[in-house]
Image (spheres, rainbow, N blue to C red):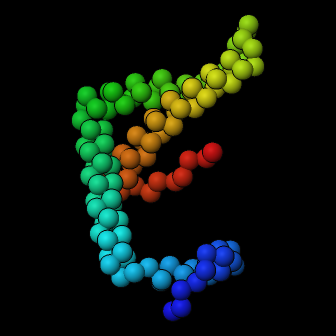
Amino acid sequence: MQPQSFEEMISRAASGGHEWFDQVDAKLRSAIDVQQEKDAEDARAISGAWADFAATPAGRKALERLFDTTLRRTVFFVQLGLDAQSMATFGAFREGQNAVAYEIARQIGLGNAEAVTPRET
């Protein structure tokens, strides 16, 4: 396969062609494959650790408290006396809390080999 210019790669990728990935040098492709396998192994270890933690009584208690104070808590963006910017900041803060709690729950599901659906954004 003939090397393509950057513009040609973008044009082909935009039209659905991904054969330009085949241009990667064999040594680089091998290094990428090794790194991807290491990353996948790390991801399995992390999700397994969260699942193990969730399976313990203390872990379950800690996670229940976390989820009660984040994902299961009603969010009111309107607070008396607060300006719009303060309410937006509060909303972003709460979304950050929920995102962390959701990621933990997602990791537990992956560690338990459950089907995990993507979070709505």
Q: Position of residue 79 (x, y in %)?
A: 70, 13
Q: Position of residue 23 (x, y in %)?
A: 48, 83
Report whether residue 71 is seen. no
Residue at 40 percent across and 81 percent down: it is 25
Above or below for 7 versus 94: below
Tell me the quadrant of the picture where the C terminus can be found. Answer: top right
Of 11 and 65, nearer the camera is 11
Of 116 and 30, nearer the camera is 30
Residue at 57 percent across and 32 percent down: it is 95
> Which picture quadrant has residue 80?
top right
Q: Position of residue 104 (x, y in %)?
A: 40, 40
Above or below for 63 versus 33: above
Residue at 68 percent across and 24 percent down: it is 88
Residue at 26 percent across and 38 percent down: it is 53
Of 6 and 44, nearer the camera is 6
Residue furthest to the top in view is: 81
Q: Position of residue 101 (x, y in %)?
A: 45, 35
Report whether residue 11 is seen. yes
Above or below for 102 versus 87: below
Q: How many marks?
A: 0
> Which picture quadrant has residue 84?
top right
- Left or right of 53? Residue 70 is right
